[in-house]
Amino acid sequence: MDLKEKVKNLPSSPGVYLMKDSRAQIIYVGKAKNLKNRVRSYFQNSKVHPKKIIKLKASLKDFDYVLTDTEFEAFMLECKLISEIKPLFNRMMKNPQSYIYIMIEMDAGYHRINTCSSPDNPNSLYFGPYTSKHTVEKALQGIKEFYKICCSSPSNKNTPCLNYSLGLCLGMCLGGDALDRYNENITKIIGLLHGTDLSLLEVMERRMTEASEEFDFEVAAKYRDTLDAIHSLLYKEKVIEFMESNKNLAVVEPLNQSTFKLFLIKKNKILFSERYSWSEIESLRETIKSNILSIFKTTEVNSSKKVRRDEIDAAQIIYSYLKGSNSSYIVISEQLLDTKNTAELDDELNRLMQSYTIN
């Protein structure tokens, strides 16, 4: 069948598409809320297609697809398949930047702040993993310039560095009070990355507005770019914090007026998903409760509390889905998994189901 004809027969449903070359090898995996519209876009003659898409189209000889009930499942399936198959064009289209951490060394006379690819020093504080080295470096550069901690020779005491003369270093290279102020600023940066001290953002936003009002658009743009980068880091930290503290989740998403889907998620894995009818909800309560108890109590998924770099993509998909969709969820604590607390689990399930009013 001609590929354009094949596209016409695609359903307008969520799902994942798998592009293949002449050897039937999967060269690209994508997801879509509407499969027909998304796949059709590849076959439209568009001058706005980037070079990588044009090259993909030249290699494309066939495609398969997998339907899902929800866009969330399409995102998760795409993430899983890319990780397993590692298609050529997914690798090409991904930014060639490895995962990166912000590292604050706490065992020195002054607390150095750097980036690294692996959190393996027990005497250091780490934030991440982050998926964009460029974003991390832009955020850190803006923060360092704001606090004037861009010292180019911090180990040479009593000798001012070049950046000190340029006004970018408050003088920790000279030791004394300046070194104390430097460490105080590092403490503020730690608070910022933890999300507990956002005063820096308020000051930067005010200075950005002032620069714009004075028609100094270059300075305003610099503040804007730094703020965007910092907000991106803070969002990633929220994702990581959420996934590390909420290991077991029961999620309900309405599919239509008559059916809903239940997901049981442990950290970054969907352990169970099933469609149910709203009209049968009362008779299904015990079945749902039994599934929750048996699946969460018997399934082990990365017992480490920390989110690993290979888990961050799926963790971000789950976090974005829970915070931005019409789904509702409850956290199933270890206490709720105790068979002695079935009444408490019943109460939580009632709260989950009653979060929707089906007319």
Image (spheres, rainbow, N blue to C red):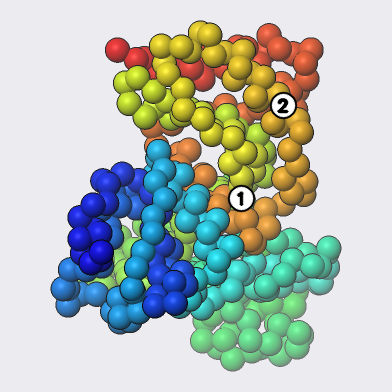
Q: Nearer the viewer, mark 1 or mark 2?
A: 2
Could you tell me residue 20's position as x and y percent? Answer: 40, 70
Q: Is residue 331 above or below residue 67?
A: above
Quarter of the image where one finds residue 244: top right
Using residue 54 as the reference point, say whether residue 305 is left or right of it. Answer: right
Q: Residues within 10 Å of mark 2 (few under 14, many from 20)?
A: few
In the rendered structure, which amino acid carries the disc numbered 2? Answer: Ser
- Above or below residue 290? Residue 234 is below
For the residue pair 134 and 21, the one nearer the viewer reads as: 21
Find the distance from the CA under tag 1 to the CA under tag 2.
26 Å
Kindly check if marks 1 and 2 are in contact, taking CB atoms under 8 A apart as contact.
no
Amino acid type for the residue under numbered disc 1: Ile
Q: Position of residue 87 (x, y in %)?
A: 49, 71
User: Residue 328 — which label?
Assistant: none
Q: Which residue corresponds to mark 1?
A: 240
Residue at figure coordinates x 35%, y 19% from the top left: 258
**Residue 136 visible (yes or no):** no
Q: Is residue 148 left or right of residue 212?
A: right
Q: Residue at x 62, y 13 (%)?
A: 286
Q: Quadrant of the N terminus?
A: bottom left
Question: Badge 2 is on which residue?
Answer: 294
Residue at 40% x, 38% y: name it. Answer: 69
In the image, residue 49 lies at what x, y percent? 24, 75
